[in-house]
Image (spheres, rainbow, N blue to C red):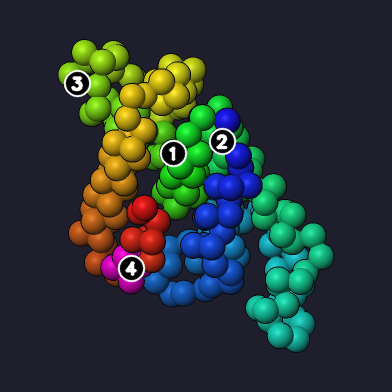
Amino acid sequence: MAKFATAYDVTRKIEGGYANHPDDKGGETWKGIARNRWPNWEGWKIVDVMKGKELFPSNLYSAPGLQTKVESFFRSNFWNINKLDLITNQLIANELFDTGVNMGTKTAAIMLQEALNLLNQRGTSYPDLKVDGIIGNKTIQTVNNHSSPSKLLKTLNILQGAKYISIIKNDPTQETWFNGWLERIS
């Protein structure tokens, strides 16, 4: 079974630290947690206290309890919600976790279901899955029994890349993030 710590280690390196870029639709972020999206995350109280102290934002790295709150946030809101601990292939779990963090858990689940349906040889390998954005028992079973995890991973990356291109076509200001988004496609 896939391990949260392994997936989180990959994503945390991409997400970085503190940012508050004017073109970032998430607004102020710490370790990938966007204040606009998650205004009630309890870690913001610590961030706000640290803003009034010397060496901000580097002082956030040593703020007591902040990293624990970050990891707990990601585990409950992105790992557990998509039942990624039930996936046997760590690379696929890593991909789904990171996509969920970057695009939303429902989007990650939809991409997984679409990828599985694209790879089923028009229903001859296994029946099409309902594309509902909910990773349930059928989706988990289909992922874990898939004959070509490497093709599944490639298909997930293709769908992810297509989504990034669509975002930029709809809002050219988001091209600012394209190089960083490419880091997420393995």
Q: What residue type is labelled 3?
A: Gln
**Location of mark 2 (residue):** 2
**C-alpha gap between disc 2 and disc 3:** 27 Å
Q: In the image, which disc is placed on residue 92? A: 1
Disc 4 versus disc 3: nearer the observer: 3
Q: Residues within 10 Å of mark 2 (few under 14, many from 20)?
A: some
Of labels 4 and 2, earlier in sequence is 2
**Location of mark 3 (residue):** 121
Q: Position of residue 185 (x, y in %)?
A: 35, 54
Q: Are marks 1 and 2 in contact (CB under 8 Å)?
A: yes
Q: Is residue 132 above or below residue 62?
A: above
Q: In the image, which disc is placed on residue 183? A: none
> Which residue occupies 77% across, 69% down?
63
Q: Which amino acid does label 4 sit on?
A: Asn
Of labels 2 and 3, earlier in sequence is 2
Q: Quadrant of residue 107?
A: top left
Q: In which quarter of the image is the N terminus?
A: top right
> Which residue occupies 25% across, 27% down?
119
What's drawn in magenta, residue-wise? 175-179
Q: Do the residues labelled 1 and 4 touch (CB within 8 Å)?
A: no
Q: Residues within 10 Å of mark 1 (few under 14, many from 20)?
A: many
Q: Which amino acid does label 2 sit on?
A: Ala
| In magenta segment, residue 44 | no
**Location of mark 4 (residue):** 179
Q: In this view, does 129 lie above or below 115?
A: above
**C-alpha gap between disc 4 and disc 3:** 33 Å
Q: What residue type is labelled 1?
A: Ile
**Residue sitting nearer the eye, 147 or 126:** 147
Q: Residues within 10 Å of mark 4 (few under 14, many from 20)?
A: few
